[in-house]
Amino acid sequence: MRKFLKISFLTLLLLLSAAWLGIWLGQDRIISLFVVGLNRHLQVPVRASRLEVSVLDQFPRLSVTLHDVVMHGSLPQDTVRLARARRLYCAFDAWDLLAGRYRVRAITLADARVNIRRDARGVGNYHILRPDTTAPAAEEPFGLELEGIRLERVQAVYEDAGRQQYFALHTPDLVASVGITDARVSVSATGAALVQTLRLGSDDYFRAKQLQLRTTLTVDRLRHELTLEPSEIRVGPAAYAVQGTINYQGATQLNLRATATGADVQSVLALLPPRLTRPVAGYQSRGQVYFSGTVQGELSARQNPAVAVQFGCREASVFHPQYRQTIDHLQLTGSFRNGPAHAARTAVLTLQNVRGQLAGRSFGGDLRLENLADPQLDLNLHADLDVARVVRFFPLTAVQTARGEAQLRLQLHGKLRAIRQQPTARQVAGELTLRHVTLRLRDFRQPFTDLNGRLLLQGSDVAVPVLSGRLGNSDFRGRGTLGNVTAWALRPEQTLRLQATLAAHLLDFNQLLYVYQPTAGTSGSGGGGAGAAGLRVPATLELSVRAEAQQVRFRRLRGRRLQGTVRLQNQVFSSSGLSLRAAGGAVSVRGTVDARQPRLLKASTVASCQQLPLDSLFYVFEDFGQQFITARHLRGQLTATAESDTYFDAHLSPLTDRLEAEVTATIRNGELLNFEPMQKLSMVASRATLRHLRFAELHNRLYVQSRTVYLPEMDIRSNVRAASLIRVTGTHTFDQQLDYHVQIPLLPGLLPRVLARADGPVLRLGIRGSESDFAVRYETGSALARPGSVPPAPNRPVTAPAAGPATTPPWSAERPSFELKKPVKKPAQPQVGEYFEF
């Protein structure tokens, strides 16, 4: 047996050697016949670096191998080559060679690029075969009788300039059998293909998708028609069956049908362009997803074919691996048609019987969308929602975290353009019910907690019959109306209007004034960047709120029974009157706060208080930033009215150099306790008496300007017998520099009773220096008697005047030079568009 195998092998080797020798001796004739025959069948030039005859390249067939092949297209003056290939194998059967007939039975194209093009007129570059020589005569020595075509690592590109189409695919190993006659070309292909893109217009379909092809098609060259037999394209687990005809004699006529089986959401989305799938690209699905459709009619620059698609899913699940949320038991049926005009204006998309569950809570609805050029929308939606699961499944950039329960009912009917602009209650209606909802929003420092209530959507407005909850430490319960909601939500720079009545147990302005802090790039913030403080107000918000609060907190302030109305327009707050019980008295404020520049706020207000304890007032306002006279020094009840223009920086600290104010004040039952400057008047009364100085009703008008408090002349009637009447005037700067002038009439005990009158001789004192370093000095009468004279330096200690007749004119004869008048008020400079309502 071994001897027999050895003889057989030697015989085969001898035969192969003889065949190789015969081919080597006759290869010039074979190549000559091949070149002549190829030029007779092709009407475009083909170039190759070299040709050779090989037994091994396409064994067991003999092949003529062309190296570095370049083939031109049929379009004149086209610089793009139809094909470039590293190698082209044309295989012959050995029996044909023995019979003296050279028939190309198979072609293998390796490491090649094929560019198929149609110009703007619809003329292609692929007409390379001579139509009368596709079938060889029996007596001809050379001919094409293709039984198969193999594409190895071939990149094919199709470009249609007239229709704006571009297809690119790569075939690592695609096998095709081809039959060519005068009338038709038949192709059967099987193998893998990597679709780089199928571009229609500006949209890319099948982008970077691996396909498995099994197709049979026939090209009728006389009728210019391509018939696609039932073929299958597989994308992952999905299989798409396609069949039909394409007639390209004149305008392209399509008659195609496609059906999908075994598909899921991912495989369907894989067919669509990124701009349509980007919002849902991360979602995955399980379950049955199906669709089928037809394309019929003319495809040209003037007309589109009729498109009809039916689709749906049964018991499907949609989930997102990052958020770990799943929609279960999803069912729907849908359809799409481009209508009688085969255009977007007659297209109709419908979704019916939509049902599913998210976190065990059901939802459902239906949708009809007509006229994609000017959409007409009909939507009915109802859902029972777990807010935390919904926000995780559909993330919103404005919401960081959420939890609670909600029920939603929504109906939209009408033109989408009208819904965006000014919808009616018939076009837009809905209801949202909240139960124990918590929201932490991106632009808010404090969360909304325990939200309960109902919101009714009626056209462009939202009616709020009742809504309660908390914002940080503050609570609220109210009702109202939100106006222009749909336009504000759908279009930028639209205004949201709020009218509401609000009641609260506690309003904590330590949080509320800083609660809205938009991040960088948020529209409507009114300027500034991320991290900037200040009272930041959206430019697109208008409101009118009637508020009542039982308690109010701000720094040391503990108020109660806040009442009033606050309005906001053009980022300017205004109020005709806010009242508050605080610090043991009553306070009311009216005016405006201009918040158009968050880092420079202007408050123009008129404030009044009644029977407000002085010590409580100074404690609440932290002694007004000075330590000269503090809450521990004062007792009494203050009744005052203050008109002021105040500016605040980004941290809501007042800009004192811009502050202007006029205060009319009355103090009743006043007391001055342990006030150090009074201790230095021991020549008038004992220190024990001066430590507890009581005075009758005081009335004066103060002015604040240029960081200085101006105190006009004021009479103080005290409980000190020796100084029962004291006149005071002076200034006190915000840098705590003092300049006070005091007049004390000389009373019995110092002068005879006949001279101890109110207009008699007086003791004039000056208090100058700082809070921590001040001096009380006696001021000479001669310098004080003449207006315009310069007082001497305050370096003389206080001494009692000499007895005898008074040499100083009566106090009322001439006003002293240090008497202060009301400072000239700076003219108001209102901003453009400023909103005042008193």
Image (spheres, rainbow, N blue to C red):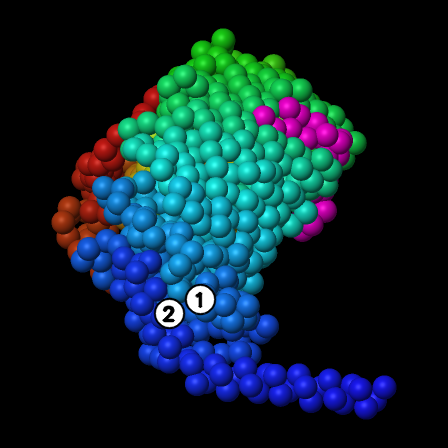
Q: Residue at x 23, y 62 (%)?
A: 79
- Residue drawn at x 40%, y 65% is 141
Does dot 1 land on a helix, a strand or a loop? strand
Residue 829 horizontal/vertical position (percent):
22, 36
Amino acid at the residue labelled 2? Phe
Would residue 348 be counted in the magenta stretch? no
| Quadrant of the rendered image containing residue 360 | top right
Going 59% across and 56% down the picture, which residue do you hit? 191
Say which mark, if any, is on residue 689: none
Tag 2 residue: 34
SS at badge 2: helix
Q: Amino acid at mark 1?
A: Tyr
Q: Residues within 10 Å of mark 1 (few under 14, many from 20)?
A: many
- Can residue 541 be seen in this snapshot? no
**Residue 826's spot in the image, x, y percent?**
21, 39
| Residue at (60% x, 43% y) in the render | 232
Question: In this view of the protein, which residue sits in the foreground, 28 or 113?
Answer: 28
Please say whether residue 315 is one of the residues in the magenta stretch.
yes
Whether pointer 2 and pointer 1 mark residues with C-beta atoms closer than 8 Å, the reply is yes
Depth order, front residue of 94/243: 94
Query: Looking at the image, is 733 positioned above or below residue 432?
Result: below
Q: Nearer the viewer, residue 267 or 514?
A: 267
Picture coordinates of residue 78 (x, y %)? 22, 58
Placement of 48 over or under 114, stated as above or below: below
The location of residue 115, given as percent across then percent down, is 35, 58
Image quarter in which the C terminus is found: top left
Image quarter where the N terminus lies is bottom right
Distance from Cα at disc 2 to Cα at disc 1? 8 Å
Residue that label 1 marks: 102
Q: Which residues are magenta?
A: 310-333
Asked if residue 322 lies left or right of residue 588, the reply is right
